[in-house]
Amino acid sequence: MRGIARLKIKEAFKIAGLCLIALAIPVMLGLYAFQAKKYSDLTKEVIELESKQEKLIEENKKLVGEISLLSNAERIEQIATEELGMHKAESDDIIRVEMTGEKK
């Protein structure tokens, strides 16, 4: 009797183990699909961010070019004289002020 009971217990464990393996395969496939989807989404996001970065770099280059054009000394002088009516100061137009005393 004891031998038969042990045999039945071994058989039950064997069947339980096979059932666990049979259930583990679909679970593992589901986890794989989930990870693949997540990887795909992250890859798309990286591509979008790289594209956005390239656009921002090009825009930055354009802005740097515009800054160098706008800050050109000749252009500033032309605007000052033609549009604002300014002129270069003569040496007798310059007044020097000296401050004496202690700073508080």
Image (cartoon, grey):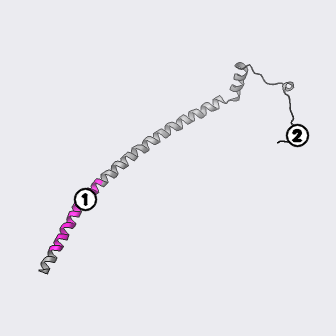
Instruction: Tell me the tag on residue 95.
Output: none
Please identify the dominant SS of the magenta region.
Answer: helix
Label 1: which secondary element: helix
User: In the image, what residue occupies the spot 14% across and 80% down?
Assistant: 2
Give coordinates of residue 49: x percent, y percent: 46, 42
Instruction: Judge from the rendering whether residue 47 lies leftward or rightward of residue 59; answer left or right.
Output: left
Picture quarter with the C terminus:
top right
Query: Label 2 to label 1, Cα distance in Å?
Result: 89 Å
In terms of depth relative to the viewer, which is nearer, 95 or 12? 12
What's the residue type where badge 1 is placed?
A: Ile
Q: Name the residue under label 2.
A: 101
Establish if 47 lies above or below 22. Answer: above
Horizontally, is 29 left or right of 89 in the view?
Answer: left
With respect to residue 50, does 6 lie above or below?
below
Dot placed on the residue nearer the N-terminal end, 2 or 1: 1
- Residue 70 point in image, percent of width and height: 64, 28
Instruction: Give yes or no for contact between labels 2 and 1 (Cβ–Cβ under 8 Å).
Output: no
Q: Residues within 10 Å of mark 2 (few under 14, many from 20)?
A: few
Q: Residue furthest bottom?
A: 2
Residue 20 occupies quadrant: bottom left
Structural crowding at the residue carrying mark 1, measured as other residues with C-alpha within 10 Å and reported as few (<14), some (14–19) or many (≥20):
few
Tell me the residue that label 1 is attached to: 25
Q: What residue range appears in magenta?
A: 8-30
Q: Where is residue 1 in the image (x, y as percent from the top left)?
A: 11, 80
Q: Residue at x 64, y 32 (%)?
A: 68
